[in-house]
């Protein structure tokens, strides 16, 4: 008796169909309408949006592409910002946007990866990781570093965060 073992493309197609079937009708229709455009870019399990952010401190500059999450949209809506930086555990620089971001349980994670832009809900801070970091619950990914990841660590003082347009 032969055992069916799906190929990787078949398994991915099945996963996309299952994912789409779980969406509310309006989102399912949008998913189907965009299917011809090709795959949605994904990082760390989250779809990437078109939103890009540049964060500078002195001559150091890092750019991030934001995920398609409510927290990332809330952060993006508050830009531009100029805020003081605080170093935390020699692994990240953090700053406090004026308004807390809306988060969902689905977006929470534990292990931070160097180069990520994230949000810690209990404290209300956005942070840039320059080292891998484990902080427990309530971390929410906002975006992934596109460039300047090596320039996060030497940042200090004040940052300027602004929207990048293509």
Image (cartoon, rainbow, N blue to C red):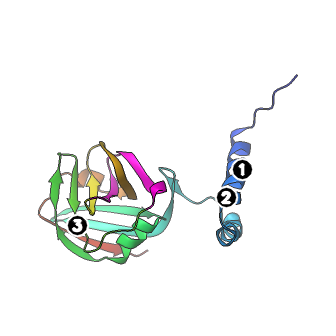
- Label 3, on which residue? 96
The x and y percentages for residue 24 are 66, 67
- Does 121 sit above or below residue 136? below
Which mark sits nearer the N-terminus, 3 or 2? Answer: 2
The answer to whether residue 164 is magenta is no
First to last magenta residue range: 104-122
- Label 1, on which residue? 13
User: Circle 3 sits in a helix, a strand or a loop, which is it?
Assistant: loop
In this view, the residue in front, 9 or 17, is 17
Q: Are marks 3 and 2 in contact (CB under 8 Å)?
A: no
- Does 43 sit above or below residue 74? above
Q: Where the N terminus falls, by quadrant?
A: top right
The x and y percentages for residue 8 are 68, 40
Dot 2 surroundings within 10 Å: few (below 14), some, or many (20 or more)? few
Q: Residue at x 81, y 27 (%)?
A: 3
- Does 153 sit above or below residue 56? above
Q: Residue at x 45, y 56 (%)?
A: 105
Viewer can see residue 144: no
Which mark sits nearer the N-terminus, 2 or 1? Answer: 1
User: Circle 2 sits in a helix, a strand or a loop, which is it?
Assistant: helix
């Amino acid at each position: 008796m032969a055992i069916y073992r799906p190929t990787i493309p078949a398994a991915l197609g099945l996963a996309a169909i299952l994912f789409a079937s779980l969406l509310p009708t309006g989102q399912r229709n949008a998913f189907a309408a965009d299917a011809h455009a090709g795959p949605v870019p994904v990082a760390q399990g989250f779809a990437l949006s078109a939103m890009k952010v540049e964060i500078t401190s002195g001559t150091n500059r890092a750019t991030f592409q934001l995920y398609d999450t409510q927290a990332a949209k809330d952060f993006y809506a508050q830009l531009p910002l100029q805020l003081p930086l605080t170093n935390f555990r020699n692994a990240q620089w953090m700053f406090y946007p004026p308004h807390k971001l809306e988060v969902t349980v689905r977006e929470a994670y534990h292990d931070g990866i160097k180069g990520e832009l994230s949000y810690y809900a209990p404290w209300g801070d956005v942070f840039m990781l320059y080292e891998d970091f484990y902080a427990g619950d309530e971390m929410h990914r906002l975006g992934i570093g596109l460039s300047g990841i090596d320039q996060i660590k030497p940042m200090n003082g004040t940052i300027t965060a602004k929207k990048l347009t293509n």
